[in-house]
Amino acid sequence: MSRLDCISNRNFKILTAYLQSIGLDEGRLFDGLSYPEGQYESARDFFLDEDEWTTYENFETIFRRARKRSGDPAFYFRCGASSGPLRSWGRFNTFVRIFATPNDGFR
């Protein structure tokens, strides 16, 4: 599986930060999903490692479980919109501190 076929696990940092902000924990979001068991102690450890990548199927399953857990029909929008205020971009927060505007990244 190449990274072209995968989605960054960094997205799950945003998702879990949002769930925590509305008073929910991760619950069983990662249960039963495949991950490299020999390299990680738990599925949670793997899926929250922002250096790793997962399949679209795992990505979709986790996000659908999170939406169901929240009970919010606007979950996907609110989760994405929360990433700025919650500063849940993981390592991308470094770039936010360095560059004042998006144009600074291109100079």
Image: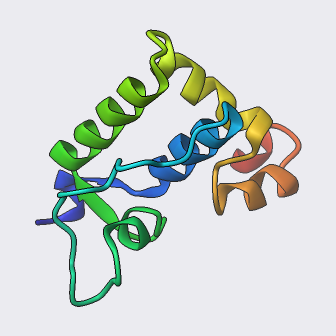
Find residue 12 and report its horizontal and vertical position in percent.
Answer: 46, 50
Q: Is residue 102 visible?
A: no
Find residue 28 and report its horizontal and vertical position in percent.
Answer: 35, 50
Q: Is residue 90 visible?
A: yes
Task: Give 35 or 100, whichever is nearer the viewer.
Answer: 35
Q: How many marks?
A: 0
Residue positioned 48% across, 25% down in the render: 70
The image shows residue 4, relative to residue 86, as above or below, that is below
Find residue 107 and report its horizontal and vertical position in percent.
Answer: 76, 49
Find residue 17 and report its horizontal and vertical position in percent.
Answer: 63, 45
The image shows residue 72, relative to residue 86, as above or below, that is above
Asked whether, in this view, residue 74 is left or right of residue 17, the answer is left
Asked whether, in this view, residue 103 is left or right of residue 8, the answer is right
Q: Quadrant of the N terminus?
A: bottom left
Residue positioned 38% across, 62% down in the render: 47
Residue positioned 35% across, 84% down in the render: 41
Residue 85, located in which quarter of the rendered image?
Answer: top right
Asked whether, in this view, residue 11 is left or right of residue 106, the answer is left
Asked whether, in this view, residue 100 is left or right of residue 23, the answer is right
Task: Give 46 or 27, whichever is nearer the viewer.
Answer: 27
The image shows residue 24, relative to residue 39, as above or below, that is above
| In the image, farthest residue toward the bottom | 38
Residue 91, located in which quarter of the rendered image?
Answer: bottom right
